[in-house]
Amino acid sequence: DIQMTQSPSTLSASVGDRVTITCRASQSVSIWLAWYQQKPGKAPKLLIYKASSLEIWVPSRFSGSGSGTEFTLTISSLQPDDFATYYCQQYNSESRTFGQGTKVEVK
Amino acid sequence: QVQLQESGSGLVKPSQTLSLTCAVSGGSISTGGYAWGWIRQPPGKGLEWIGYISYSGSTYYNPSLKSRVAISVDRSKNYFFLKLSSVTAADTAVYYCAREVITGTTSGMDLWGQGTTVTVSS
């Protein structure tokens, strides 16, 4: 199994802050990594696929980078709608795995 | 547009089998390039991938659940199903069905149902 580890688990930030979340894979997943945003009581929503490609609805303040085993999700200027939990997920192997999640909360 | 909707028993007794259905509307489950999967989220915890069935009928499961899981499809009704046997309290979770793009220029789980809560309790 490929294990995915996110850091930090919780991130306290203010509107306008630049926010970076890291996701590490236990072995290379190439660029086959997605990021999801989840708000309380709601299903996750796909934000980024293939490590850096934004879904059509995603604002340009979001960006993804990385390949192999290390990936980052960056929000360039945090907005009120961005407070949520973010998950990375690899789909390099037939068995998909999610990171444990990073909660972005109000500082 | 394509939508997914989960349904099934919200309360299952320990040792019994959990059965859920995901109805696909607005598009065909047989469309090439997609897989149809299940993900769960225990209360207050993160997401766990359960498995998927591809448009060709191939199935892939989480190794930790493989001995208890079966995912199948009814193409005539545009449904797909999850069965999880020998459930325990640890299987209590919100269960989501989702569509995953597995071929083409895009990828990832781009469409999700709203989720259905399943509680395992006697």
Image: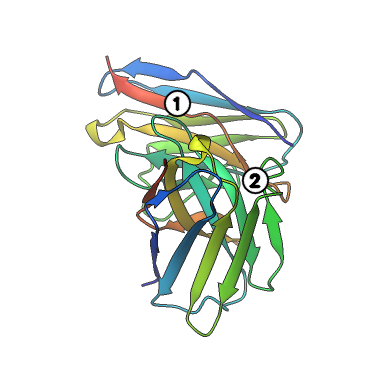
- Looking at the rendered structure, the secondary structure element under dot 2 is loop
Q: Is residue B6 left or right of residue B64?
A: left
The image shows residue A98 at horizontal and vertical percentages of 57, 37
The correct choice, above or below, for A90 with respect to A100 in the image is below
Left or right of residue B8, residue B31 in this image: right
Q: In which quarter of the image is the N terminus of chain A?
A: top right
* Chain letter of the residue beneath label 1 in the structure image: A
Q: Quadrant of residue A25?
A: top right
Residue B73 point in image, percent of width and height: 58, 72
Q: Which of B121 and A69 is in front in this view?
A: B121
**Residue B1 left/right relative to B71:** left
Q: Where does label 2 land, which residue? A: A96
- Marks 2/1 in contact by CB < 8 Å: the verdict is no
Point 37% across, 40% down: residue: A38
Q: Residue furthest bottom?
A: B76
Picture coordinates of residue B57 (x, y %)? 68, 71
Whole-angstrom CA distance, mark 2 to mark 1, is 18 Å
Residue at 36 percent of width and 24 percent of height: A104
- Crowding near the residue tagged with mark 2, few <14, some 14–19, many ≥20 C-alpha atoms within 10 Å: many
Which chain's residue wears label 2? A
In this figure, which colouring scheme has been used for the structure?
rainbow
Which of the labelled discs sits on residue A10, or is there none?
none
Q: What residue type is labelled 1?
A: Thr
Q: Which amino acid does label 2 sit on?
A: Arg
- Can you see residue A4? yes
- The residue where tag 1 is placed is A102
Q: Does label 1 lie on the same chain as label 2?
A: yes
Among numbered discs 2 and 1, the one appearing first in the sequence: 2
Q: Where is residue A35 in the image (x, y as percent from the top left)?
A: 50, 40
Residue visible at 39% across and 33% down in the picture: B43
Disc 1 crowd rating (10 Å Cα; few below 14, some 14-19, many 20+) is many
